[in-house]
Image (cartoon, rainbow, N blue to C red):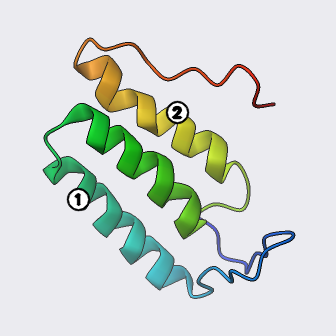
Amino acid sequence: MRSLSVGIERSVYVPMVIPQMIEECFDQLIIRAQKIHDPYEQAFFLLVQLPYLQAFDDVNKRTSRLAANIPLIINNLCPISFVDVP
């Protein structure tokens, strides 16, 4: 989890700054994701919510793409592939 403030280039969105709030929101996000039973919906939820939270100094979008594949793989479904994303 990050302890410094971050900014997002070319965006007016300002992520949370307080580390305790970031960790609490991250925990809530995981709990909400676990309550979603449909693997596709769970994958989409993680794909969207993790980068929005900006819980890490870097790799938020990459982490969300990886996390989105977990419910799909667990349910023996084809993982999402982002071939054009560096």
Q: Position of residue 52 (x, y in %)?
A: 55, 65
User: Image check: 57 left or right of 44?
Assistant: right
- The residue furthest right is 10
- What residue is shown with label 2? 66
Query: In the depicted view, which residue is nearer to us: 19 or 11?
Result: 11
Image quadrant where residue 71 sits: top left
Helix, strand or loop at mark 2:
helix
State the count of labels.
2
| Disc 1 residue type (three-letter) | Ile
Query: In the depicted view, which residue is nearer to us: 14 or 27?
Result: 14
Within 10 Å of disc 1 (Cα), the crowding (few <14, some 14-19, many 20+) is few
- What residue is shown with label 1? 31
Q: Position of residue 17 (x, y in %)?
A: 63, 86
Image quadrant where residue 13 sits: bottom right
Residue drawn at (18%, 37%) of the image: 38
Residue drawn at (49%, 76%) of the image: 22
